[in-house]
Amino acid sequence: NSASSDAITLASDGTCTANITNNLSNRNKIINGAMTVHQRASTVTGITNHGYRTADRYQLNVSTGTFTNTISTDTPDEFGSSFKLDCTTADTSLAADDNVLIKQKIEGQNLQDFAKGTSAAQQFAVSFYIKTNKSGVYTVEIKDVDNSRIATKTITVSDANWNRYTLIFPADTTGALNNDNGASLELIIWLAAGTTFTSGTLNTSSWASSVNANRVSSSNVNFADSTSNEFYLTGVQLEVGGVATDFEHRSYADELRRCQRYFERVTLN
């Protein structure tokens, strides 16, 4: 075929190596990446603060404007649910500390194969599907909570269709992640940010110490600036290495069990 490298190689000792993608389960470090589990609610209105609203494991931080969060059936092919955010009260002039963001916290014991903080450190491949009528720049951040370090990238949304975005974050030989059940890493998508987070210099080429002013692009959109704004998210994936593979679909039962480590709703009849 037209590939630039061999798909299968055979060494002199008889070892065979095949270049096969998507051959491993448990690649995705994100829980509920397809937004299939929403134990708390399918719709929450009047959101003005931080918390977990609909899709399990996704924390929605809001310090400006008012929003409605819904589990939507508007999705790209191969998905059944998406995380929808509607702006219902706008703020066209952000205060310095204002922010709107979506994040997931990840336990350190689930991230040891990144070998962060060692000479064998691996890259971080992030991918997700977004649909929004708010075009422009969005900042995507990986935050190392254990060592107060950040890595940032940006995406540019140029149309109102479903698109998959892939980002490769560099390996980090500084700062090992704790091997425990604490929140060692956060994956964050910034939808709005005031000057507290945008007034510095965005570093998109390497990891750096976490400084608030350097966390978000000064060109980041203000998703809170119009009540017409809608944002959809699904197919979120974080995996080891320099290649973003196809989304790892898991069964509802598997995803629910993972979510129930953090929250379990019991209904009494």
Image: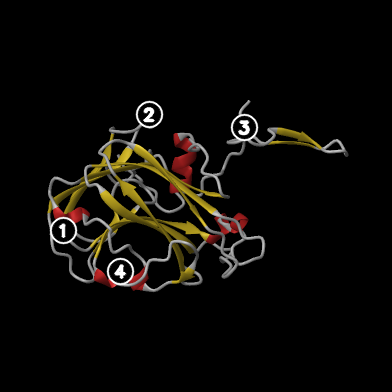
First of labels 3, 2 by sequence position: 3
The N terminus: image quadrant: top right
Q: Amino acid at mark 3?
A: Ala
> Which callout, 4 or 3, points to the residue nearer the camera?
3
Q: Residue furthest top?
A: 1
Left or right? Give the position of 77 relative to 250.
Answer: left
Judging by the rendered image, the residue that carries numbered circle 2 is 77
Judging by the rendered image, the residue that carries numbered circle 4 is 197
Judging by the rendered image, the residue that carries numbered circle 1 is 65
* Measured Cα–Cα span from mark 4 to mark 3: 43 Å
Q: Amino acid at mark 1?
A: Gly
In front of the other: 199 or 174: 199
**Crowd rating for badge 1 (residues with CA inside 10 Å; few <14, some 14–19, many 20+):** many
In front of the other: 173 or 46: 173
**Are the residues flagged by discs 4 and 3 in contact, CB closer than 8 Å?**
no
* Measured Cα–Cα span from mark 4 to mark 2: 35 Å
**Are the residues flagged by discs 2 and 1 in contact, CB closer than 8 Å?**
no
First of labels 1, 3 by sequence position: 3
